[in-house]
Image: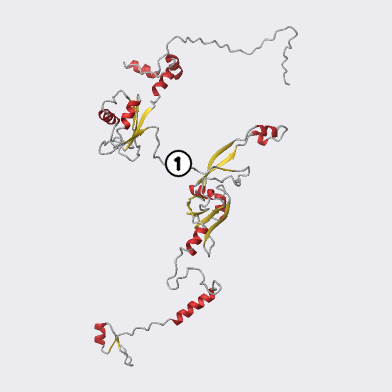
Amino acid sequence: MESVKNEAIPQDGEKVTSTKRKSAIDEIEVDLTLPEPPSKRARRALKKGKPLPAKNDSSDEKAKADGDGEQSDKKEKARSEHGIWVGNLPFTITAAELRQWLVDNSGGVITDDSITRIKIPTSKDPGRDKSQKPANKGFAYVDFTDIAGKVAAIALSETELGHRKLLIKDSKSFEGRPAKEKEPEAVETGPDGKVKHGAEQNKEVDPNASRKIFVGNMSFKTTEEDVWRNFEKCGEIDWVKVATFEDTGKCKGYGWVKFKQPEAAAWAVKGFVKVKEAVETEDDFNDGDGAEDRKQDQQKQFKTRKWWVNRMLGRELKLELAEDDQSRYKKRFGKDAQRQANGGERKGRPSQGRNGFKSRDEAASDNSGAKTEAPEKAAKPLKEAADIQVARLTGAVVKHTGTKMTFD
């Protein structure tokens, strides 16, 4: 029989005491005024009789100790507004040599104290000899305390230093720098991932530019659907042509894509296209009441990212602008086409007759008639020799005598 343990039920007013032992934790008092105990590294140093290593103060302690230290650092790090750019420098010159050259050639206007900063960028070539100092990039930035030093330094332009004429100008002057090419605007895609019509149009691109591109280094397993799927993010495609073998029907490794806009072809040649996509929020998935009002009040956000089109089926594609169909036709059949030497007619065009043009059959019959009427050149007679010894010496043919010679 199972033994049943009777527990005492507390009556009203009785205090229930728990038989479980409660763990009592004493609070630890920490005196923040005491010095920090030394670390293991410091204790080892003290044991060996070495001085304690310097400890780096935390950012909070340093800020409290220095007070307005950040403001003073900003003032010290702030560059002077009077600066110059020095170009065509020798690749082995140092900052000290450039400073000395400016002081010696300025006529006393520039002093050591007036030069606050000299920055000579160096080229970090990974294949260079690490034992030698890295060479500079051929230019430097120099800051002065006042405008007098800057004016005196700019006046030294076209002066030789190390058999090189220096180019010195204001550090904020960008004259002579080529203009940066403007990239086409990012194409905008819809919720289905397809490019919106008209979104890829850009006024900066020449409308007469080629709309066709050449795609090379493709896999032999490539199909027109693969090419279409790879380049549809660049813009609306007119047609896709993949060169195939006649016997097997497999891809020859190259093809063409023609877009409806030249901007799409320009993006495809770059190897990537900047796609502007809408950022999905939680309200886009809520169909409850008030979701549409929140969507209207909340402005739609977009993000731009790169969509790469220079790889397909694990191969790096070769992308080039192809010759447009119209310009190709003019080159083959236009005024600049190569004329035939005999008739002076254009290549690939039917000859003109009474009604303007002759048919290809008439032109072929005329050409065949011209060939028959032309006098055939008579065959040149071969040299003959009666004696076989003469024939051997002169290289002539032995005259036929009607007899048959046999060799035993």
Q: Position of residue 85 (x, y in %)?
A: 35, 33
Q: Quadrant of the N terminus?
A: top right
Residue that appears at 35% across and 16% down: 52
Provide the residue designation for mark 1. 180
* Amino acid type of the residue tagged 1 in the rendering: Lys
Q: Position of residue 356 (x, y in %)?
A: 54, 71
2 vs 109, nearest the viewer: 109
Q: Is residue 20 above or below residue 364?
A: above
- Residue furthest to the top: 13
Q: Position of residue 148 (x, y in %)?
A: 33, 26
Classify the position of the C terminus by image quarter. bottom left
Q: Residues within 10 Å of mark 1 (few under 14, many from 20)?
A: few
Horizontal and vertical percent for residue 350?
Answer: 52, 71
Q: Quadrant of residue 27?
A: top right
Residue at 35%, 34% (x, y): give it: 169
Residue beneath the point at 48% across and 47% down: 270
Mark 1 element type: loop
